[in-house]
Image (cartoon, rainbow, N blue to C red):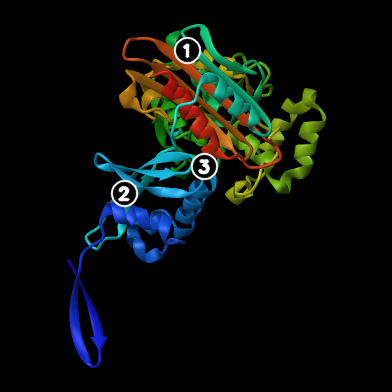
Amino acid sequence: MRLVVLFLFGVLFAVAQAPITPKAALERLFTERPARAGWFAPAFLQQVPLAQVEAILQQLLGGLGRYEGVEPDGPNFRVSFERGVVPAQISLDSEGRIQGLFFRPPQPKAALTPEQLLAEYRKLPGEVSVLVLEGPQERLSLNADRALAVGSSFKLAVLEALRQQIEAGQRRWSDTVPLRPEWKSLPSGTLQNLPDGTLLSLEQYATQMISISDNTATDALISIVGRAEVEKLAPRNRPLLTTREAFVLKNPQNREWLERYRANPAERATLLPQLARLPLPDVSVFAGGPVAIDVEWFFSTRELCTLMGRVQALPLMSLNPGLANPADWQRVAYKGGSEPGVLNLTTWLTAKDGRQYCVSATWNNPQARLDENQFFLLYTSLLNSLK
């Protein structure tokens, strides 16, 4: 119990006030707008600023419609909106302040048929590609052979190049390589914060690249296995850009270099040594709409499923399950990628009866930010239809 002190007509009263429950704290986030700093523990706000919390809440309300309520779901909760349900976890400190808050991707309120799902995908502005495989057989397909920008999902090709070299005996997962300064890129990831020369094993680089999509780990592995070896698995992506090179080209300060890169595809490889000397942009460049999404990595959903099929058995592929609920499956392997205007989700599922599926969906729109919650709802519907 908390004591709230009131001063009324010159008399001091101490009024016992029941601490807020986790359910009530979660409800308050959507019923008393906007969120207030006093609702959160200071340590939480050091990690997640109030503005970021508010942006997430606004995204949920904007993408899923009217808030309808919170229901318990075991030790956790489900937040219902007009167009979907969001699983949530929340924990409070001894003073009733939020010290932990986690929202999973939204789920559909009702199952859609395959025909309804395809119709919804077709309504999305821009270009969309979807493929659902059961074993080698197609269960659902929309523009499955169209190559679109896929963001960090290209890292499946980097991992496959490494896996092939390890399988051939050229390298071992335990091999260590010092972190070099020229590999350091922008987040996502954390390796860019480590001291130059930090010794990391190939397994550590690969694990960071897949589990948290570490861009510095990715650029390290491209250098280690060789750009040309990755290009063999991604022939239309020549030269295959490192994440740093892509960020440099998207830097508004480097506009001249971007135009040179665009103007003559046959000469792009000759520009790479010069790009290494140019500055990275500030991450705020990507806070708005799409930025030069023609500077990207292009794959079809069919190609991504092929790559995923080759690497899905690696233990590190199951560290991040993406939108799938691991409890529903014997095993889940996942890699996704995004930047403003670009989104891909690729998941390999092994059912409890041993059947295997690949679900890959890509959405590109160079004109506007994507409604990620809408895409997540459709993708989750695809996953749920296979359970």
State if disc 1 and disc 2 touch (CB < 8 Å).
no
| Residue position marked by numbered label 2 in the rendering | 90
- Considering every residue shown, the one lying at the far bottom of the view is 10
The image quadrant of residue 271 is top right
Q: Which mark is on residue 386?
A: none
Do labels 3 and 2 touch, CB within 8 Å? no
Give the residue at mark 1.
310
Q: Does residue 244 appear to the left or right of 313 in the view shown? A: right
Question: Which residue is at the front of the view, 120 or 246?
Answer: 120
Query: From the viewer's perspective, is residue 311 above or below residue 298?
Result: above
Q: Position of residue 46 (x, y in %)?
A: 39, 58
CA neighbours of label 1 inside 10 A, class few (<14), some (14 to 19), many (20+): some
Which badge, 3 or 2, comes first in the chain's sequence? 2
Q: Amino acid at mark 3?
A: Pro
Q: Residue at x 32, y 60 (%)?
A: 41
- Say which of marks 3 and 2 sits in front: 2
Q: Percent x, y for residue 371?
A: 58, 40
Q: Nearer the viewer, residue 205 or 385?
A: 385
Residue 187 circle label? 3
